[in-house]
Image (cartoon, rainbow, N blue to C red):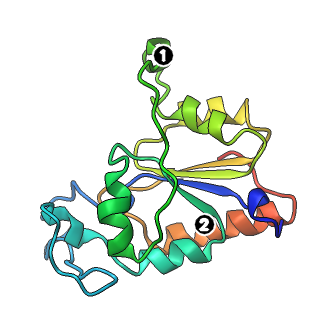
Amino acid sequence: MNAPELRPLLFLDVDGPLIPFGATPQQLPGGYPAYCSHSGRTEDAGNPLLARINPAYGPRLLALGCELVWATTWMADANLVVAPWLGLPRLPVVDWPEDVDDADGRGGLHWKTRTLVELATGRPFIWVDDEITDIDRRWAADRCEGLGLLYRVDPRLGLTDADFAALAAWVRGVGRGGGAAG
């Protein structure tokens, strides 16, 4: 698993995992913490929610040893705005299809699921998002031979230490031949 082409893919959403939202004042009495960017920038590039992104996530994501890929509706803007905030290099961006299968949505499958599983064919992968459901997990498990982890993040909290520990444990398991869709 040392060759770059065999590293697990990590498909990463922005809103929810990196930019937490939706917590009530009772859940976060002091509100969300505000951070400066990895480079020390404080400007928000027109988006005041950027200050919610913990710049320490950049090195932590890189330390997982995965090939990071933006899987977000931010599209190329993730490289222009979010990557520098985190101190990340430019990353590949998923090019979402225009013609998402309506039957998937009616069946409860998230509109990203089919595309990400197809992009990862034959490779271990993690998908980190706040909208993943059990329907997505079952659908992926039937198609990715235990090579995928669909990891739901609580959007009110964003990525946490426990999330990073779970992701790292899964990557270690894949390196030993383990790993399962979950």
In the image, is 157 to the left or to the right of 101? left
Q: Nearer the viewer, mark 2 or mark 1?
A: 1
Q: What numbered label is drawn on residue 101?
A: 1
Where the N terminus falls, by quadrant? bottom right
Location of residue 59 with respect to 12 vertically, above or below:
below
Q: What numbered label is drawn on residue 21?
A: none
**Viewer-proximal residue among 2 and 165:** 2
Q: Tag 1: residue type?
A: Asp
The x, y position of residue 55, in whole percent, is 36, 78
Give me the residue at 35% from left, 57% from top.
Answer: 78
Query: Can residue 26 be spotted in the picture?
Result: no
Q: Tag 2: residue type?
A: Ala
Q: Earlier in the sequence, mark 2 or mark 1?
A: 1
Tell me the CA gap for discs 2 and 1: 31 Å
The x, y position of residue 166, in whole percent, is 60, 66
Q: Residue furthest bottom?
A: 40
Location of residue 91 with respect to 2 vertically, above or below:
above
Report the residue marked by disc 2.
166
Q: Are marks 2 and 1 in contact (CB under 8 Å)?
A: no
Query: Can residue 174 be spotted in the picture?
Result: yes
Give me the residue at 63% from left, 38% from top.
Answer: 119
Crowdedness near tag 1: few (<14), some (14–19) or many (≥20) residues, C-alpha within 10 Å: few
> In the rendered picture of this protein, how many numbered marks are placed on residues?
2
Give me the residue at 75% from left, 48% from top.
Answer: 123
Give me the residue at 26% from left, 87% from top.
Answer: 40
SS class, disc 1: loop
In the image, is 149 to the left or to the right of 55? right
SS class, disc 2: helix
In the image, is 180 to the left or to the right of 81? right
